[in-house]
Image (tube, grey):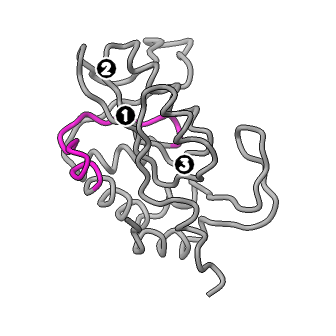
Amino acid sequence: MTNQRLIDALRDADAVRFGEFELSHGGTSDYYVDKYVFETSPDCLALIAEAFADRLAEMGEADTKLAGVALGAVPLVAVASVETGTPYVIARKQKKEYGTGNLIEGALAEGERVVVLEDIATTGQSAVDAAEALREAGAVVEDVLVVVDREEGGRENLADHDLELHALVTASELLADRDG
């Protein structure tokens, strides 16, 4: 289902740019979805929080603990937590070399269900890494919910790790009718 209000907000915030861009996994693309543009826009964040809450309810996960992948998904998981009233944890990409040295920040109980929230899925590897860290910490993780699925293999990569990808918006939807 297309979330046209969110698509319009992402476009209006100029979060979608065209040109030649190198992506974090090393590939290139003729478009770029700038997460920092939409993650710093109060209007976009409000719509994302609402859309995440609606999608979590549709998935039957309205009361499930959330996890945000550091750093990009931290603002997203925070606003989703406020919108849904559910607590969250942060999954780090690597352990800190100071303080607690935790990979997972926040309270997490053994066997607790967690849905991973992420900004953009290209290969999905960041979400896979977060899910694995959460699983190692004792969580049950089966679902990843992203703002934008670039439709470049993320769904398949996640499925290979027993994770289902859910997206608020796909690249096809975001890029459709962009000239008119």
Give SS at disc 1.
strand
Tag of residue 41: none
User: What kind of residue is marked 3?
Assistant: Ile
Residue at 39%, 21% (x, y): give it: 134
Q: Position of residue 172 (x, y in %)?
A: 57, 64
User: What kind of residue is marked 2?
Assistant: Ala
Q: Quadrant of the C terminus?
A: bottom right
Look at the picture and state if 42 lies above or below 136: below
Report the magenta residues as a range.
55-72
Residue at 54%, 17% (x, y): give it: 96
Q: Is residue 83 left or right of residue 120?
A: left
Tag of residue 120: 3
Marks 3 and 1 sit apart, C-alpha to C-alpha, by 15 Å
- Please check the rendered image and state whether residue 69 is part of the magenta-colored stretch, yes or no: yes
Identify the residue position indicated by label 1 in the image: 67
Marks 2 and 3 sit apart, C-alpha to C-alpha, by 22 Å
Give SS at disc 3.
strand
Give SS at disc 2.
loop
Identify the residue position indicated by label 2 in the image: 139
Q: Position of residue 34 (x, y in %)?
A: 62, 57
Residue at 37%, 43% (x, y): give it: 77
Q: Quadrant of the N terminus?
A: bottom left
Look at the picture and state if 131 lies above or below 24: above
In the figure, residue 174 lies in which quadrant?
bottom right
User: What kind of residue is marked 1?
Assistant: Ala
Label 2 vs 3, first from the N-terminus: 3
Of tags 1 and 2, the one toward the viewer is 2
Label 3 vs 1, first from the N-terminus: 1
